[in-house]
Image (cartoon, rainbow, N blue to C red):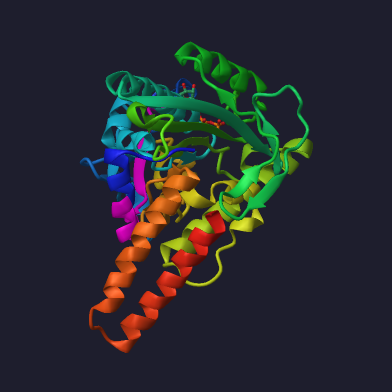
Amino acid sequence: MGAIGGEELKKWEKMQGAPLGSEEKILVLVRLRPLSEKEISRNEVSDWECINETSILYRNSLQERSGLPTAYTFDRVYRGDCSTREVYEGGTKDIALSVVSGINSTIFAYGQTSSGKTYTMNGITEFTVADIYDYMQKHEERAFVLKFSAMEIYNEVVRDLLSSDSSPLRLLDDPEKGTIIEKLTEETLRDWDHLKDLLSVCEAQRQIGETYLNENSSRSHQILRLTIESSAREFIGKDNKTTLSASVNFVDLAGSERASQSLSVGQRLKEGCHINRSLLTLGTVIRKLSKGRHGHVNYRDSKLTRILQPALGGNARTGIICTLSPARSHVEQSRNTLLFACCAKEVTTNAQVNVVMSDKALVKHLQKELARLESELKTPTTTCDHVVLLRKKDQQIEKASFLS
Ligand SMILES: Nc1ncnc2c1ncn2[C@@H]1O[C@H](COP(=O)(O)OP(=O)(O)OP(=O)(O)O)[C@@H](O)[C@H]1O
């Protein structure tokens, strides 16, 4: 793959000078949905209120005396009458669209069954794709390649949503790319209509089950992945061409409630246990990361956390939309969702611009870096600085000789 010119080379070199990349907290939004017709017919009342743009309050005088928190604060909270467009504009857009600048991003929807995850993610996905196509149209100086893949995790088995073959897919560890999904279909997109067709294929393939809580309840975790590669047209075919390459994941998780709560039996109960294994691991990973990056993090305990490891404290920008039913009967689940959201907002990720360079361009870059380190060695510094510089220089020589 080729090297960058101008803009992205500067960006890339800037990132090299700042090896820690760009640290930021995970964006956490909470979206309350309106009471459903079913809930209204059961005379349910809405106990939650968004009192301003960032705080949500539990208003139930009996529970308020229980000692549990009544007010929660997040990056943004959305009332039942807010549109998905508003949720998108309130931070999700910025994160999702980082992908066009070579930065990985992930948007999750987390919440109990029937709280509005699919409703929200469908809109977020559509708005993001529309904006990506709009961006491409406005940046004719760059050549873009869009690739799409889709998978679901059902009972801890990963399936390809773009293939009629339902055999389980294996996860492999790649020293450079991290966890990869073996044989996952990756379609190169012709245009937006092509993507719409593929999204319909995914929808049809997704495991749907009926539960007590939601007649169209999705019992699987779904990950849609859009990968964007772009290069400046003026450098295409030249030695110093570089390509920016990043992916945006749209993750629609299965309902976070316990299996027993949706009156599951038999096969459903098994599904519930497996769903909980992935969600439980997601919860423990988030909890652990919220306390800082010390010690072992159990990403490998579930397929979901293995695949999404970069989005959980790694090289990515991440947004989580936590969806809530306002009904009193769901208060316990809503509190659990908010507890998860509170931990998630303490987690930091470390996004970097992902540049793929041609070997020639990389050798050139390493030679430049070597020259810089040599000139630094010539200037008087402490012994400790010298040891660090010499180590860096050895590393650069090793990389350059490996490539040449
Ligand atoms: N913000 C909203 N405004 C209006 N209707 C909504 C909203 N959120 C969800 N709904 C409606 O509520 C129902 C349940 O929503 P949805 O299927 O998105 O839930 P879910 O969390 O994805 O459930 P599951 O985990 O079972 O897949 C749907 O009929 C959807 O249209």
Judged left or right of residue 20, residue 382 is left
- Residue 88, percent from left and from top: 32, 30
Q: Is residue 299 visible?
A: yes
* Image vertical order of residue 356 relative to residue 194, above or below: below
**Residue 54 against residue 191 in the figure, above or below:** below
Place of residue 271 in the rendered image (x, y in percent of width and height, measured from the top left): 71, 40
Residue 169 is covered by the magenta coloring: no
* 14 part of magenta stretch: yes
Q: Nearer the viewer, residue 284 or 100?
A: 100
Q: Residue at x 65, y 48 (%)?
A: 303
Q: The magenta stretch spans which residues? A: 13-35
Q: Position of residue 91 (x, y in %)?
A: 29, 38
Outermost residue, left side: 52
Q: Is residue 38 left or right of residue 368?
A: right
- 121 or 353: nearer the viewer: 353
Q: How many labels were placed on the picture?
A: 0
Residue appearing at x 33%, y 71% in the figure: 374
Q: Residue at x 30, y 77 (%)?
A: 377
Q: Is residue 81 left or right of residue 209?
A: left
